Amino acid sequence: MSSSDPRSPGHRSRRPSRRERAARQQPNAGTGEVSDVHREDGVRLQKVLADAGLGSRRACESLIAEGRVEVDGVVVRELGTRIDPESQAVHVDTFRITTQADRVYLALNKPAKVVTSMSDPEGRKTIADYLRDRPERLFYVGRLDYDTEGLLLLTNDGDLSNRLTHPSYEVPKTYLAQVRGPVPKDAGARLRDGIELEDGIAHADSFRLLDSTPGHALVELVLHSGRNRIVRRMLEAVGTPVERLVRTHFGPIALAEQRPGKLRTLRPHEVGELMKAVKL
């Protein structure tokens, strides 16, 4: 390590010039205040962006120069800016990015007949069977019942997990259900107006009949509630018992073509969309 390296024991830190300090400071939007986000002992911002999967260092430098990067709410255009990725919030194009290297964000297509738990006293298959190679302690987000398939999120980000499951943030979930038909003409209106269940009224955000054959129908239901077996209970209450149920979306995250039993890592923009949905 050379003596000119700031990490060198013999290096004496040079006090930044007025111009350099000004370049590292930008007005906080809406307040007019000036905030210095630079941390002398931090990590270069372009490296933080590159490590988060936003492209090469050069591509990340372009993001900074174009004014598309914010640190703690402050637009940063100075390429020499260093930050603390453990404590400072970074947004790119208004979406927050993950700067903590140990954070994990996964999507699992849970098959039917799998318990949403890390263990089961009855010896049934659990989601832990799909996580045996993962060293992290993961939380599942949005339980799915034993017979329900589809999108399940897993993370070790406790703050995000708590917000995604908290009713006040109203993150919508989308389900496809094969039901016993025919579907009553007033089913959608009743579901949107609210169904009286034993644990309170439950409302659907939207309801669509997608297909119908003699004795069966395919419907789509969107709702915020995460109560136990809520979709099955609502559809049974309007006379259309569920034969098969799949969650296809959790907020902005889509199951798409992911195969049953398969895990995938969420892309940086997907994590950012989740964080934006819960105001992180």
Image (cartoon, helix red, strand yellow):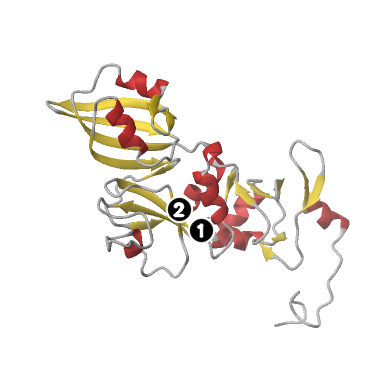
Mark 2 lies on a secondary structure that is: loop
Q: Position of residue 115 (x, y in %)?
A: 32, 55
Query: Relative to 177, is 42 on the left or the right?
Result: right
Mark 1 lies on a secondary structure that is: loop
- Tag shown at residue 267: 2
Q: In terms of image quadrants, where is residue 82?
A: bottom right
For disc 2, the neighbor class at 10 Å (few under 14, some 14 to 19, many from 20) is few
Residue of label 1: 53
Q: Residue furthest front?
A: 198
Q: Residue furthest left?
A: 214
Q: Residue at x 56, y 60 (%)?
A: 50
Q: Residue at x 66, y 46 (%)?
A: 67
Q: In terms of image quadrants, where is residue 102?
A: bottom right
Instruction: State how far apart marks 1 and 2 are (Cα).
Output: 8 Å
Query: Relative to 32, is 157 on the left or the right?
Result: left
For disc 1, the neighbor class at 10 Å (few under 14, some 14 to 19, many from 20) is some
Q: Nearer the viewer, residue 62 or 265?
A: 265
Q: Residue at x 67, y 63 (%)?
A: 44
Q: Nearer the viewer, residue 38 or 260?
A: 260
Q: Nearer the viewer, residue 174 or 238?
A: 238
Q: Position of residue 247 (x, y in %)?
A: 33, 42
Q: Position of residue 166 (x, y in %)?
A: 53, 43
Q: Are marks 1 and 2 in contact (CB under 8 Å)?
A: yes
